[in-house]
Image (spheres, helix red, strand yellow):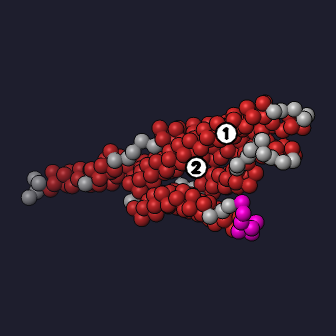
Amino acid sequence: MEAAHTQHEVQHLLPARPLRAAMLAFIAALACLEVSAGVVVSEAWRQREQGTGGLELYELDEMLARLRALEGVVVIGAVVLTMLWSFVAVHNAARVGRNTRSALFAMVSWVLAPIAMLFIGRADTQQMPLLIGIGTLTLQAAVLWLPFGTIGSASAKIGGQRAPFFHWYMAMLLGFVVFRVFTQGTDVLQMRPSEDLGTVASMSLVNGVVIGVMMMMAAEASRSMQQATAEKLFQRQQLRDDAFDRFRHAAHEHELMQRVTAPHA
C-alpha cells in the first residue's frame, strides 16, 4: 500500500525545470534591457554635457521609451513565470512532504503579492510628500517578502533551506528600489540638470548588475527547492524499500519456521 502511494506521488509530480529555465531567461533578458537603457541614457547625458543633441536626443528618448515598454513586457513575463514555477515547485513539495497547508499559503501569497504591490504603487505619486513615498516603498517591501517567506517555509518543511529565498528577495528588493527611486519615468528631453541624467545612467547600469545577481539568487533558490524535493522523495522511497525488505525477510523467516515445524506437527 505504501509502495502504491509513493508511486502515485511520483506520477503526480509536475515538471519544474522548463519553467525554471524560462523564468531565469526572462530575468536575464531584463538585466540586459536595463543595461541597454543605461547605455542610452549615458549617451544622452554625454550629448547634453557637450551642448549638442536636438534630433539625436529625440531619437535617444524614443529608443529609451521602446526599451522601457519592452522591459514592461519582460517584467510581466518574468512575474508570470515565477508564479507558475512557484506553484509547480510548491505542489511537488506538498506531494512529497504531505504539507498541504504550507503549499496553500505559498500559492495564495504569490497571487496576492503582485496585486497588492500594484495597488499600493498607484497611491504613490510625485506630488506626495517624501515621507509618504518612503512609507509606500516600505509597505511594498513588506508585501514582497510574503511570497518569498512562504515558499522558503515550504522548502524548510521538506528539509530545504530558507536562506536562498531571502537572498533572492533582497536582490529583487534592491532592484525594485533603485528602479522606483532613480530610473522610473526618465525623460531625456525634459530632465533639467544634465547631472540627473548621469545619475540615472549610472543607476541603470548598476541595476542591470543587481538584476543579474538576482538571476543567480533565483537560480540558487529554485535549484535548492527542487533538490530538496528530490531528496525528500528519495528518502521516502528508501523508507518504503526498507519496509518492504523487512516485510519480505520476516515472511521468509516465517515460511522457514513453518517448514521446520511442519514435519513435527
Q: CA distance from mark 2 to mark 1?
A: 33 Å
- Residue found 72% across the figure and 63% down from its top: 127
Give the image location of residue 130, x and y in percent. Answer: 76, 66
The mark found on residue 179 in the picture is none
For the residue labelled by badge 2, is the local secondary structure a helix, a strand or a loop? helix
Q: Is residue 2 above or below residue 16?
A: below
Q: Is residue 209 left or right of residue 234?
A: right
Give the image location of residue 46, x and y in percent. Answer: 86, 35
Q: What amino acid is labelled 2 in the image?
A: Ala
- Residue found 52% across the figure and 38% down from its top: 22
The magenta region covers 126-132
Report the front residue among 241 and 217.
217
- Mark 2 crowd level (few <14, some 14–19, many ≥20, 10 Å Cα): many
Quadrant housing residue 145: bottom right
Which comes sooner in the sequence, label 2 or label 1?
1
The N terminus appears in which quarter of the rendering?
bottom left
Report the front residue among 103 and 82.
82
Furthest toward the front, the residue is: 54
- Mark 1 crowd level (few <14, some 14–19, many ≥20, 10 Å Cα): some
Residue at the disc numbered 2: 221
Report the front residue among 207 and 224.
207
Report the front residue among 27 and 240.
27
Label 2 or label 1, whichever lies nearer to me, is 1
The mark found on residue 65 in the picture is 1
The C terminus appears in which quarter of the rendering?
bottom left
Give the image location of residue 144, x and y in percent. Answer: 59, 59
- Residue found 70% across the figure and 54% down from its top: 180
For the residue labelled by badge 1, is the local secondary structure a helix, a strand or a loop? helix
Furthest toward the right, the residue is: 50
Q: Is residue 147 visible?
A: no
- Residue found 77% across the figure and 38% down from its top: 41
57 part of magenta stretch:
no
